[in-house]
Amino acid sequence: MGIEDNAKKGFFSSKVSFKNRSTVFTIGNRNSVLTTELEAPIIVPHAAQKAETKHTFESLFRSQHYALVDNCCREYLFICDFFMVSGNSAQDLFNSIMGKTLSMFLKHMDVYSSDCFDSIAVYLCIHIIFRFQLMMHKRAVPALDKYWETMLEMLWPRFQYILELNIANIRDTDPQKLGSVDYRPHYITRRYAEFSGALVSLNETFPDERVNQCLARLQMEVENFILRLAAEFPQRKEQLIFLINNYDMMLSVITERTSEDSREGESFRKLLQERTQEFIEEVLSPYFGGMMTFVKEAESAVEKGQADQMKYQEQRIQKLVRDFVAEWKQAIENVNQEVMKSFTNFKNGTSILQGALTQLIQYYHRFKEVLSKPPFKTMAVRSQLINIHHIMVEVKKYKPNF
């Protein structure tokens, strides 16, 4: 997962021409093997070869095991009826007939899984097994119970091993070896978002705590990796733009694939909100930083009963008021331009702009409130303050039309 985009070789870069152009990190419509295609007709090898149709491994696995399920159900029920047996006797007869076939299937899967690094394919195969187990239980056929258990004992360790490799890979990735980094979402975080969204959505149908634990560790390493990448930018504002773009992209991809209240979604939503709030303070600071700092100091002094200590700051207040009156309209336009060019998601950028302008109005309201109290309320400069409604009218011009 942490390999460079332009340096991928071998398995991870093989351009397998799936119809949906999926990779080992994205699911596309591959999960259809669990829904609409679960009981689709089996793949006929010579027909697929003639049509030059390519199939993912999980599609072949589903086809092979759907044929196996159908034949084994018929065989087991025939044994029970013809030989008038049940329980262990029926199972022993079934094993004597189908045992070599099942052994061949297991051997084939062992060979494939030992060299497989497509964790989504392995996990889809696990979920195919879950569904075929249910199908056979509904038909009251326990003939393949031991086979399914053996298959799962083979697939689960491989799935966890691949996840561990990805976790270690992200942890060991050096941002300085990945070339230049810009504000846009990084390709490694996009891989993670697609990958995590795929596994979380699959895990919601048959939850397994082992998957949750692995994904939690992977998420922690990805969050640390993003912070290491952000540290490549010299300015805090640049770091925040990069973090917000990445958190927003990951949240969008994960919530598209999973339920709204998924743990991953909630985590990135919280991180996005925190960094957005910090960015709003940063983007307002160059234009309104003096007023913002004064408001915080004055409110703190009033709260502590030390407001009288602020009465000698009339010159500072006069400068703040006059600067605001002279520059506030142009400052709002500058904030608008800076925000809208910084974020790759237009909707997110618009939301951040609205948040920044709302924050500005709140700061100005607090500024006026502070100046309306002793020892400031007798200052003549208060008459120069702009009516807050004029600011609100100007802010409405930047409100989106959607």
Image: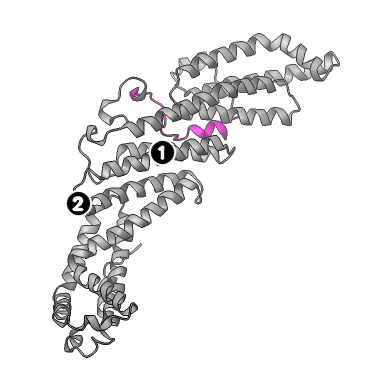
Quadrant placement of the N terminus: top left
Q: Residues within 10 Å of mark 2 (few under 14, many from 20)?
A: few
Left or right: where 136 falls relative to 44 = right
Q: Residue at x 36, y 62 (%)?
A: 402
* Up-down relation of residue 153 to residue 111 (above or below): below
Report the Cα–Cα distance between label 1 and label 2.
29 Å
Name the image quarter holding residue 106. top right
Q: Position of residue 116 (x, y in %)?
A: 45, 20
Give the residue type that dot 2 points to.
Gln
Look at the magenta stretch and give its main secondary structure.
loop
Q: Would you say residue 182 is visible in this rendering? A: yes
Give the farthest residue toward the right. 84
Q: Residue at x 49, y 45 (%)?
A: 258
Along the line of sight, the residue nearer the viewer: 333 or 297: 297
Q: Which residues are magenta?
A: 13-39
Left or right: where 201 falls relative to 317 = right
Question: According to the image, label 1 marks what residue?
Answer: 194
Q: Position of residue 51 (x, y in %)?
A: 45, 18
Give the residue type that dot 1 points to.
Glu
Q: Position of residue 226 (x, y in %)?
A: 32, 42
> Can you tell which of label 1 and label 2 is closer to the viewer?
2
* 28 drawn magenta: yes
Question: According to the image, label 2 marks what residue?
Answer: 235
Q: Would you say residue 23 is visible in this rendering? A: no
